[in-house]
Amino acid sequence: MARHFGVIRFPGSNCDDDALHIVNTVLADRGATGEILWHKEHSVGQVDGLIVPGGFSYGDYLRAGAIAAHAPIMESVKAFAKAGGPIIGICNGFQILCEAGLLEGALTRNESLRFICKDIYCRIEGRPTPFSKDIPAGRHIRMPIAHAEGCYRHPDVERLEGESQIIFRYCDADGNVTSDANPNGSINNIAGICNASGNVVGLMPHPERACEDVLGKGGSAGLGLFESALDSLANSGAAR
Amino acid sequence: MIQHGPTVDANLAKEHGLASDEYKTLCDGLGRAPSYTELGVVSVMWSEHCSYKSSRVHLKTLPSDGPQVIEGPGENAGVVDIGDGQAVVFKMESHNHPSFLEPYQGAATGVGGICRDVFTMGARPIALADCLRFGNTGHERTSYLLHGVVAGVGDYGNCFGVPNVTGDVVFDDSYNGNILVNAFCLGLAKSDRIFRGYASGVGNPILYVGAKTGRDGIHGATMASAEFAEGSEEKRPAVQVGDPFMEKLLLEACLELMESDALVGIQDMGAAGLTSCSVEMAARAGSGVELHLESVPMREEGMTPYELMLSESQERMLMVVTKGKEQEALDTFSKWDLDAAVVGHVTDSGKVIVKMHGEVYADLPASLLAEGLKYDRPQERPSYLDEVISLDLDTIAEPDDIGETLLDMLAAPNLCDKSWVFQQYDHMVRHGTVVRPGQASSGVVRVVEPESGRKKGVAIAAGCNARHVYLDPYEGSRLAVASAYADLVAVGAKPLATTDCLNFGNPEKPGTMWQFAESVRGLGDACRLLNTPIVSGNVSLYNETDGVAIKPTPMIGMVGLIDDIDEVVTASFKEEGHHIAVLGALGGTLSGSEFLKHCHGQERGVPIPFEMERHSKVFAAMLEMTKARVLASAEDISDGGLLCCIAECCLGAQNLGAQLSLPAVEGRLDELCFGEGPARFVVSYSKENAAAVARAAAGCGASLLEVGVVGGRELRLNIGGELSMKLPLAAMAGAFGGAFEAFS
């Protein structure tokens, strides 16, 4: 069964072990496996899905994700995306995918100008993606955020809205999308999006930190994203 | 010997912070006058910061042994066994002086330094904690320092990727001119793969790894060994600049190299940089080292041996590798794009020899430098103690409205919600945080142990009530230890060992020295009684500006082990209908309390002392209850007393009110509600577990008094059957949650 994930390690990635832990340990009984992919490699190898993890790749120097977007492995990541392979970019991973042109828009400094680490809620919506299609549209889940540059910007956000490319939207505990529930000033409360084909997803919240009940009594709603990916891989029968 | 630089004499030595008798000791020890480079090297090694010359005679009285201790003080960090072949490595360290001058970089490099101390030993850092002390919230510099320090701590740890899980923030006038930034780091290692700072094996090459050396931070350690006075801002160039990304690379590269057998010894270049690193590694191993400074990666041209030896550029390590394995090490560093170079080799000369382009610039006996100086400075009990010891409660008006007073207390800078601070710290990275900051008085991270299947956790408590130490240095220090112990047992952790960070004023003043000696005596006694040996620590003296010293602040970091993280309880009430009880004494004292300070502006009286016989029974009961999994919540009652504690338990994630009924009191109502004392807890549990909870308390000989039930949207207090207070949750949340933002 095709369930092997590559987790890309850039210098400065620091949620790479966390992501690997989800596929290798938390989802082991679902047959998931994972491996670390080194940024200096030129091929992602034989993987069924890619996780671009959070952290501070290259120290976030220049701009968050800007240098990582030009790492040797990224050409292969782009080819994998073009071939329809499922890719999720989490936090710094989202920033990298935007900088690499695999996702539209940009993540700028939080409106408060401060780093924010806390639980937020976001609503799942938009078109079905490998990482969200098992989660009923309109459901809202709790996940942590931890970033200083998560304020999403796009010059033509209405087009993304029209194409149903907004996948995660900050909301309150009752699922209402309000300005109070927007932690960083993102346009239209956007927490995560997908590309035009729907196979590449990026989000600022950390689903990998919300996969086990024991962690901060924070719940395990984030696991749904990874389970969804496993199911879509099983259904698509993607060849390894 | 090359006499580079100005002529060395007693005057120049004085400018370097060496007293005339110290300079004489140096000349006698060498049998000659030192060179300029040697003077620089010796002056930092003999600074208070590096040599502990005023504190050593006292520190050696502290307990540091126990079956759980793998490595005690003297190394870069302490190492404690947690079973299953695993060990925790931890230490707390101050970065007070630099943080006052340049809060962002000072605090950031404080975090960087303590993390290096831990991973140097072969441990992966898994948790941070920070104890911060600022001046009065109304003081002109406080807001600037607070913003800078919190951002500095956050940015460094967030990028480096270690969760910041606990700590505290306290405001007090005595820190107006000297803030405290005490950073704690804990790492996880294999107990048989601990690395130490030894320069062993004659002929083994010495490798320099990490950031290039620049002219930053020269004489940082000397700066940290003097009082501040007007013009201290000019010392800002002595503050280093941090690069957490570089340190992350260094961490990964070092841990990777440690998997091989190439590494013999390793130490981070912290205070006094290349100097202290090479001297200490040689002294520990009883060997010698010879350095060739022209090979050191440099940031700028024309650096002199003096500058290279004294630079405190951050994110640098020195290591000794087995001869012939240099390339293996260099390859690892090259993989991580790190600068590395062979800069010398180990000798058996007992000397530290510094060469550049073949010329000798320094030739010093390692033992003379490392053993440094030792003073037993004069002590005298300060006279302020006679004044503050008494408290006449008759002069203190009882509050008219307990509810109003509670709201006022919840909004007090030292009691209010600190989310503004810890939300700027990533407290969840590394998928291990079981108890987050604000959820309990200790932070808890799990220790992944897939092989044994055990679900262990490590709990960390960090803090110190300096007011208690100010009022009675001996008893106050015992209370600081007991309080950390209480923080740990409240989450269900069995305390294992301690680290300390002793922040005091000028040791050359007998009153300060007396405070220090009494405090160390108290810490030692309490840690001996509670079997929590002190395995690492740091001393920061001269926390004094224009002659005004801080309150004596022996910060405690204590670490406990949790057998099964499913046993962990947090502070907040969980369900309507749960019973609420006080474990331990119901009332406390207003002497030295936060209430007395906040509501009446007084800091006086004698706190209730820690008594092993009585209080250890309460701790034992607490642990027994968590072990038996009969509690829904637990929180130790500390600053602010019983009512503030219960209010905080209401304001957790579930946001639940409570109905309290306390017996009629003969004494004062404010004492019952806001009094403080050691070993007291608020616990809650289901009706079904009530009998088991009572049995556990009785079995340990601890007192347990049911005081109410969880439920409703308000906190109601009946005393002797009469309604004394009724506060909506929203009002309490507003006071507690809104205060920090308002003054920050």
Image: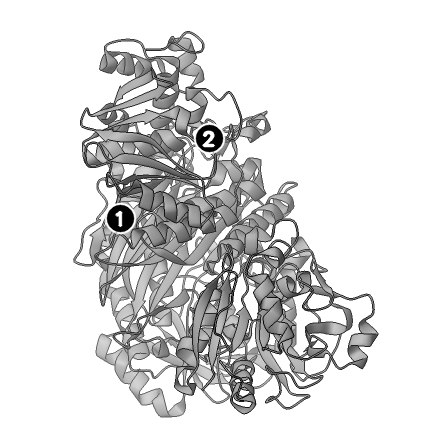
Front in this rendered view, residue A82 or B161: A82
According to the image, label 1 marks what residue? Answer: B195
Q: Position of residue B201 (x, y in %)?
A: 19, 36
Q: Which mark is residue B220?
A: 2
**Residue sitting at x 47%, y 39%:** B211
Callout in the foreground (2, 1): 1
Q: Amino acid at mark 1?
A: Phe
Is residue B42 positioned above or below B514 on the image? above
Q: Amino acid at mark 2?
A: Gly
Q: Which mark is residue A47?
A: none
Q: Chain of mark 1?
A: B
Front in this rendered view, residue A211 or B477: A211
Residue B362, located in which quarter of the rendered image?
A: top left
Is residue B429 positioned above or below B198 on the image? below
Q: Secondary structure at mark 2?
A: helix
Front in this rendered view, residue B509 or B143: B143
**Residue sitting at x 30%, y 66%:** B561
- Marks 2 and 1 sit apart, C-alpha to C-alpha, by 27 Å
